[in-house]
Amino acid sequence: MLDTRLILSGSWITVILIYLVGDVLRIYSGDFARMEAASPSSGEKWLFAAIFLLIPILMAFLSLVLPQSIARWASIIVAVVLFVFVLIDLSSYPSLYDKFLLVVSMVFNGVTLWYAWNWTA
């Protein structure tokens, strides 16, 4: 069995890749331009997006280097926060592919939560 640190790190990498696939598809499908025309983005919105996308990237690294108890609780808290955030924001995405990818990301947040919750030293 793989070390829980590797599983958590892999799960966080999976989550960020799912988010990025959605972003790429949104650009190529033209959905991004339509969404931007309907509600233009401000500098603060882009800063929030950068922070949001950085969180799973940092968690992939922190899962490997933080002490077990801190990495465990950080993964639990961040997985729950991202799950709830995506759940609340899910209806704002009009395309079926976006909804599908966001649900898959929520599943991986659940996987992350499960492994972190059951992680014993």
Image: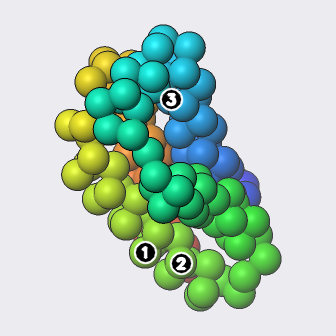
**Is 59 drawn above or below residue 31 in the view shown?**
below
Q: Say what secondary structure mark 1 lies in.
A: helix
Tell me if I can see residue 112 in this picture.
Answer: no
Q: Between marks 3 and 2, how big is the CA–CA gap?
A: 25 Å
Which quarter of the rendering shows the N terminus?
A: bottom right
Which mark is in front, 3 or 2? 3
**Residue found at the far top of this picture:** 29
Residue designated by label 2 = 74
Q: Quadrant of residue 113?
A: bottom left
**Is 95 drawn above or below residue 17 in the view shown?**
above
66 and 85: which is toward the camera: 85
Residue designated by label 1 = 77
> What's the mark number on residue 22?
3
**Callout 2, which amino acid?**
Ala
Crowd class of label 2 (few under 14; some 14 to 19; many from 20; radius 10 Å): some
Crowd class of label 1 (few under 14; some 14 to 19; many from 20; radius 10 Å): some
**Marks 1 & 2, CB-CB < 8 Å contact:** yes
Residue sitting at x 56%, y 14%: 28
Whichever of callouts 3 and 2 sits on the residue coming sooner in the sequence is 3
Residue sitting at x 21%, y 37%: 91
Whichever of callouts 3 and 1 sits on the residue coming sooner in the sequence is 3
